[in-house]
Every structure is written in structure tokens, then in C-alpha cells.
Image (cartoon, grey):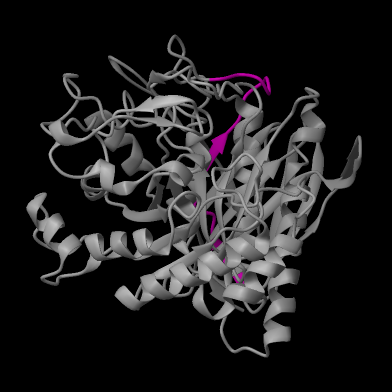
Amino acid sequence: MHTATVHLDTHFNAGKIDPRIFSGFLEHLGRAIYGGVYDPGNPLSDEHGLRRDVIEDMRGLRMPYVRYPGGNFVSNYDWRDGIGPKEDRRPFPDFAWKSVEPNTFGTDEFIRWCREVGTEPMLAVNLGTLGPAEAAALVEYCNLDTPTHWAQERRSNGSASPHNVRMWCLGNEMDGPWQAGHSPAENYALKAMQAARLMKGMDPSIQLVAAGSSGRALPTYLEWDRTVLEQCWDDIDFISAHRYSRNFQDDTPWFLAEGVEIDRILDDYAGVISYVKGVKKSNHDVHLSFDEWNVWYKDRRGNGEWRTAPALIEERYDLQDALVCAQYLNAFIRRADLVKVACLAQIVNVIAAVLTNNDGTLRQTIYYPSAMYAAVARGLSLTPVVEAPRYDAGDREGVPVIDVSASFDEETGETGVFIVNRAVDSDTRVTVQFADRLVMGAGSVQLLTGDDPKVENNWDHPNAVMPQEGTATANGQALEITIPALGLAVVSGVRTERR
């Protein structure tokens, strides 16, 4: 058995955890919309065609926001085709996924779905094949209560009151050569600035996310972000980052060290944002919206062959995938000063936490870390100092055997602790000590673990991996907990008092 110690002090923290880091992402891709969240005629759907069982699963994730409608899809999408009477809407060929989009689910249907789930919409605008004027018109449609064309159109379509969409994305992955309307950073930055000014001219209260780099592998990584930040700094609130983790070499110890790479990306963005703020001599802050993150490498089918709602990218997730997802969340919590928004990509059928068939839903392994963390993490993000054995895995050297984050609720005095045991074949006994507080109660423990890193939930065995009750002890001086090999522990309600 390994042993490790985690040192915490409530005076050393990264600021308040923004609950928006537990947001999600829904794109017009494969069966995410049609046959996913929207399935008219299915007995499980309501009178609007929204799947009630999917809504219930989404409520369990406690997502503050859901980003929509893309993704690559948005860069060739005209939102005006997805509003109004459905019999008047025209299907169109989707450039991104080589599929036919029927347009029977659009902005108003998505807003209705968000209200049913209890989440807020985070809308992306098309800055690939459309531009600032169309983006501003969508803000008018959604947010203005004026006697003007698009606001009147919204009323005619059944929404008398504005939708009040607070968060907006200025395009998607415009640095990527695969993107419809891809352009050099300077061109995108100018277009994004123009859109931002028009959109905030319509509604100054909205917050805007500029499209950052799609990943570290691109040759323009960070240089793209610097260019966009320098041009758009005063007009935006966030810049985006995306990452999909992969295990093509089928190496579990290496894969479970993925948190090291996530930390490096956050350090990269902290540096470039700080640099531009210094160059600008600005008092304005821009934060990070990590609005696409997940594991994705098993199902790479992206060509729909011009079918409607083809089954694309329906990744099946196992235990090790869930443990990597937990490390994303740990990283976001630890960098609460930087990361204010993050979106699990995606949520239904397509690289998703939940799968559907005609008879019900299946919660995949990656569903549970998000649900477990979102229920517990609130208040300050404590900065952990970890003493633990280290291991080497290929080019990832000196990796701590545990990955940790912690939260502290100043109002209740309770702490949440989140620990991933990266060890494949050894439990880890963890001691959590506070420099400034006594540990008076151990709280409750949820474990996510299994004997095989490749165990997954499937339709025959839907509960192979799901949270189970664990135990921890408190002795006044510390919290003690044993994390199983290949295990995640979420400890909630740890009671502490000032020393």
C-alpha cells in the first residue's frame, strides 16, 4: 500500500470555485439532438418532443450552463433556419459532419430544453460563414424586449419574454483548418472584435468567449491566443481552450498521468493571459473558458454520409476514462483563479456521459465524476501540497500517485476533498492535514472504482461502475482515507474548526 499526505491551509487558496466549471456541451452532431435530447413520438418524450429520461439524467449533473449548437457545426449554421413554424423550416447539408440537418430543433427548442433541465444556455454564433451582423441579430432575437424585427419574430414564435442568454461564444475553433470559414488569427480577431462590439451594443450585460486554440498540437498554439487577446482584450471576458485526452497506445499508467498535461495547458494560458494584460497595462480581466474537454479516441467516425442523425462518435467509456475526467475537474478546481467556465463535451450520445436507445438511457462511467464533484465543490479552492510516491510512465516522469483538489465552504466550515489514485495495483492511504484547522468530523465518502481499468457500463450491465459508499476517519489532527487502486474518492462535509 502507498501512503501519502495532503497539506491544506484555508489561507492558501486560488479564490472561489465558479460553479460554471461543471457545465456541458450539446452539438448538432450524430444522435446528440435527434434521438438524444429530442425524440418526438417516443413514449418517453413530453409533448414538445423532449426526452424526459434524458432531462432527468441531465439534472443529476447540475450543469449551470450548456454550450450550443456547436462545435464545428456552428460555423456553417444559420440560426434563422432553425426558428419559426417547423413546417416552414428547410433541411440543409451540414459541412462539418457530412449529415443532413432537418432544422426541427433550433434556438427556441434548446432554450425550452434548458429551462426543463434547470440550466442556462451558452450560445455560440457563426463567425465562419456568417458574421457580426447575424450574431447581433441573434442577440436581439434572444435578449431584447423591443418593437424591432427579430424581437418581434421571437414573440411570433411563442416567446413573449426575452430568453436572456447571458453567455455567448464568438465562433468555434477558428484556428483549425477543418473549420468552415477558417482564417488567420488576425482576420478572426478583427471579426470577433466587430461581433463583440455589435453584440454588447445590443445587450451590454452579456459575457463573451473568444475562440482560442483547439489544442497544443497545432503550430499556431498560444500565438493564435496572443493575437486574439491583444485585438479583443477590452471586448471579451473569456478565451476558450479545448482538449480531448487519448490513449491510443493502450497504456493505463501513462493515461492516468494525463492530469500533468492538463496542468501544463492551464499554466500556458495563465502565462499568455498575464502577458497580454501586462502589455495592455489593463485593469480588465480575461479568464479561461475550457469549453470542450473529455476523453475521445475509440470512435472517430465523423462522416455521416449525408444521413439525418447518423450514429457518429458514440464513444464507450471505461473506468480509466472516468479517472482522467476526474483529473480535469481537479485541475479546474485548483486553478479557480483562471478557469471560470468548463464544458464537458459532450453530454448525450456523442462522446457523451449519457447514451440513449428507444427504451431508456445509460449513464456511462464519465457521468459520475461530474455528478459527484458538482454536488460537493463550493466555496474556496484550497491549494494542496501533496507528499506522495511518484512513478514514471513513458515520457511522463515523476508523476505523483495521487491527484488532489479541495474546496472549503466559508459559511459552513465544511471541506470537500477530491482524490484520484492513479496506481493500477496498489491502494493509497491518504492523510489530509490542515495547518490552520482541526478536523472534527470525517463527513461522507463516495468511491468510484473497479478491478479492471477497462470495465464499462453497458446496456447489459448498466451499473458495473457507479459510486459506492466509502469511509474516512477524523482524529482531530487529520482526515484519514484509503483510496482503492484505480479509484476516485469524493469526501464531502468534512467538519473543521479553527485551531
Q: Where does the N terminus fall, quadrant-wise?
A: top right
Q: Where does the C terminus fall, quadrant-wise?
A: bottom right
Q: Is residue 418 magenta?
A: no
Task: Out of 482 and 81, give the one closest to the viewer.
Answer: 81
Q: Position of residue 118 (x, y in %)?
A: 27, 51
Residues shaded magenta: 437-456
Q: Position of residue 288 (x, y in %)?
A: 59, 64
Q: Position of residue 42 (x, y in %)?
A: 19, 19
Q: Is residue 444 magenta?
A: yes
Residue 339 in view of the camera: no
Side (left or right) of 332 relative to 19: right
Side (left or right) of 170 relative to 247: left
Side (left or right) of 390 relative to 252: right
* Above or below: residue 370 compared with residue 448: below
Side (left or right) of 2 relative to 294: right
Residue shown at 37% from the left, 70% from the top: 199
Using the rendered view, name the quadrant where residue 46 is placed. top left
Using the rendered view, name the quadrant where residue 483 is placed. top right
* Above or below: residue 271 compared with residue 240: below
* Above or below: residue 248 compared with residue 134: above
